Image (tube, rainbow, N blue to C red):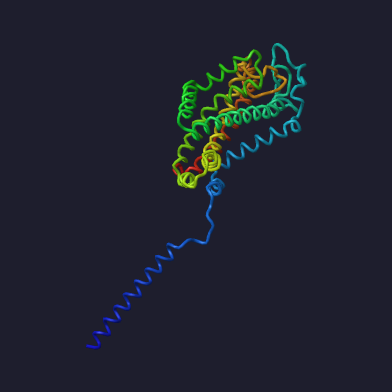
Amino acid sequence: MSTTAGGGESSRHGLGSRKKARIDALAEAGSLSDEEGVSLWRSAWRRLRRDPVFLMGLVITGIFVLIAIIAPWITPHDPTARLLITQITPATPIPDPQPGFPLGGDDAGRDLLSRLIAGSRQTLIVGVLATLGGLAGGMILGTIAGGLGGWADTAVMRVVDVMLSIPSLLMAFSIAALFARPSQWTVILAIAIIQIPIFARLLRGSMMAQRHSDHVLAARALGVRHPAIVFRHMLPNSIGPVIVQGTLVLAVSIIDAAALSFLGLGNPNDAVPEWGQMLGKAQEFFNSYPHIAVYPAVCIIVVALGFTLMGESLREALDPKSRR
């Protein structure tokens, strides 16, 4: 009898020990880690450092920006000097490549390599300023629509919808053609205007998603004023997708600027080289000397590709839904 009682007590003790061990294991598994949390941007940077697509885009973009910054100091010759003018004849309107001029010259006897390097600065200026202008205008409209809501949201979004219904290049051509004298600033203004609705709609959508988030509801419950909620809680948490879109829009801005200059709506002064302008002037000699059009076209494509690769990789790293 005592043996049976002892066996039962031992069985209960073993069962209790196993149950306690399982509880301790669950508690240990559910305990908070001592490691600090990682922000979204830091987590994205960790992914981007191992992403070959992003690194390729970063290298292309970095080289382009560096060349644009130091262009005045690395051009082999003055891009406006007609050093090869004596070699231009009716039979050979374009000087061939030669020592000291590895890419040859243009129809005015100017060094083609020097003009390509100098043109990178103008391309960067137009692309960056146009993107910043579109970003500023889009953020103003998007903040009004997403922050105020109601009739303001309806009015702003109807204007945005009308602008988005017009093909972007057609709108840019129309805006640039309104000015009596085309210039670099007319190109910047035209491209900035067509980018405004893209940023406005994206920011408005992000802010509408933030409107019902926990931290915004908590701020309202605590009696925080609406302007403070918009600018301290909704806007900072909604700007991430807009920044990513800015990287992608920069590539589009460079292509659009080249298109406007190609059609003669850019800066008419060819003493200031720009890739789109060079591409447009090269069409007259394309059949016999295609290289003078190929070089600026390749520069435009490679630079736009670099910004696109960076933007797509950044968007994928910041959006968990699109991660592979």
Residue 321's spot in the image, x, y percent? 44, 43
Q: Is residue 53 left or right of residue 209?
A: right
Q: Quadrant of residue 69?
A: top right
User: Toward the viewer: 249 or 35?
Assistant: 35
| Residue 111 makes an appearance in the image | yes
User: Toward the viewer: 8 or 264?
Assistant: 8
Point 58% across, 40% down: residue = 56
Q: Is residue 280 left or right of residue 237?
A: right
Residue 237's spot in the image, x, y percent? 52, 42
User: Toward the viewer: 134 or 61?
Assistant: 134
Residue 19's spot in the image, x, y percent? 34, 71
Q: Is residue 99 left or right of residue 308?
A: right
User: Dividing the image into 4 quarters, which one contains the N terminus?
Assistant: bottom left
As drawn, 256 above or below 89? below
Point 53% across, 30% down: residue = 141
As drawn, 40 above or below 301? below
